[in-house]
Amino acid sequence: MCQQPIYVFENGVRKVKPYFFKFKTPIKSRWIGRTLLEVLTVELGQLPKLVQEGIFKKNIFIHSNVGRKGGPVVIEGWEKLKDREIVRHDLIYNLQHIHEPSVPDGSELNFEKKTTFPSQVKTDLQIVFEDENQIVINKPSGIPSHASGSYRYNSISEILKHDLNLDKIWHCHRLDKATSGILILALNKQRASFFNEMIEKKKDLVSKSYVARVKGKFPQGVQMYNCPIFSINQSGRYMNQNIQSMPINSTTIFEGIKYDPILQESIVICKPITGKMHQIRIHLRNLGYAIVNDSIFNPDPMKSYPSFVKNGIELKLYKKLFKVYPRFEKLQPVNEDVANTKECIDISSIINFHEDKELKNALEEFSELKRTTMTTEKDKYGKKCEVCDIQLFDTNNLPKDLLIWLHAFKYLFGDDDIPFEFETQFPKWCDI
């Protein structure tokens, strides 16, 4: 990171004031022989006008001969770069004015700063446990765990580094942006290596428990759901997984613990035996008990029509799968051995992904909707940055997919030598 972030809290939202960030981009072999303007606009999708302005202002420039004798040599300015072709040992520098998306401020967790942990007074993130090797927090919904994509300072790792004045911090496991709950971070390399080895070699001793609020009356008692996980890529062009050899071991144990007949909603304990991306959310959706406010797997067409189209495509694909493999459609008695199978299936012929005209049309509709929706949101706000002239989103309005009623409330490692267990209270939304 280039500088200390300036955070602003307004109306339940955490914002980062716009800042300059210097990107360093090593060249790819296919870029050799092309101009800097062509690479940044065609390959990296930046606007030609902004790229030209950046080169004129010397915010975009090249270090040549990097790592070689006599290097690096700075090449900057429009006259020197407009026709110059990229060569080996170039490094592209791009100083950009960054506008990060806003995230929730975490107030939905509703905790008081009454704690024995010394770092709690320094941060608004709730600390569940702390010692010299690790810190465990109750991550709010809607904040990414680590810097990625459009999020840098508005991520858990960067917030903690800022609040606790840390140079480095290491993630010990993954927790989706939308999901709240237990997140373990190491304060040194040794503890990070310990967790990585534990998850890799002793994963059978690791147990995670989540709580979700779902649509409908979920069956009481402990039951299991086993079904392969797949989804449509956000571009609408292909599926995320290898559908010719798809593992069938994706397994979650569920237990319905509460039902409100007026709301027609249930509180469900979820214990993933395997750890596929969005596994709990997809399994609940497939069973007909989608998480109430899940805008990706239970979208409201009036609020998020592109997600509604995407979700409908995936449900049709799963319906084809269930016709051939009906066991993937329903809850079953608990048998954790199912999660240990190495069996894979080829579902490409079942879902007929590349030859189904109706499916192809739906995918093209989704892809176009994704492109136009972002432009519409920016046009609706109607403001541009006075510094960099880009169209802005309204940072007072959070993206629709940030908050979700899925909470990781327990993380357990049952090793005899180094056992540990971290747990939080249930969120307020469980009170139905």
Image: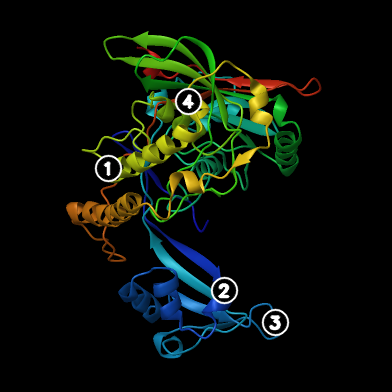
Does residue 261 appear left or right of residue 92 in this picture? left
Q: Is 78 placed above or below 320 here? A: below
The amino acid marked with disc number 1 is Asn
The amino acid marked with disc number 2 is Lys
Disc marking residue 68: 3
Where does the image place residue 94, in percent across and percent down from the top left? 46, 70
Alpha carbons under labels 3 and 4: distance apart = 51 Å
Q: Where does label 2 land, which residue? A: 28
Q: Nearer the viewer, residue 320 or 90?
A: 320
Asked if the residues shown at circle 2 and circle 4 are in contact, with their CB atoms under 8 angstroms apart, the answer is no
Alpha carbons under labels 1 and 3: distance apart = 48 Å
If the image is split into quadrants, where does the C terminus sit? top left
Disc marking residue 194: none
Residue at disc 2, secondary structure: loop
Where does the image place residue 71, in percent across and percent down from the top left? 65, 83
Q: Nearer the viewer, mark 3 or mark 2?
A: 2
The amino acid marked with disc number 3 is Arg
User: Of callouts 2 and 4, which one flags the residue occurring earlier in the amino acid sequence?
Assistant: 2
Alpha carbons under labels 2 and 4: distance apart = 41 Å
Residue at disc 1, secondary structure: loop
Residue at disc 4, secondary structure: strand
Snapshot quadrant of residue 295: top left
The amino acid marked with disc number 4 is His
Q: Where does label 1 land, which residue? A: 396
Q: Where does label 4 land, which residue? A: 407
Snapshot quadrant of residue 312: top left
Within-10-Å neighbours for mark 4: few <14, some 14–19, many 20+: many
Residue at disc 3, secondary structure: loop
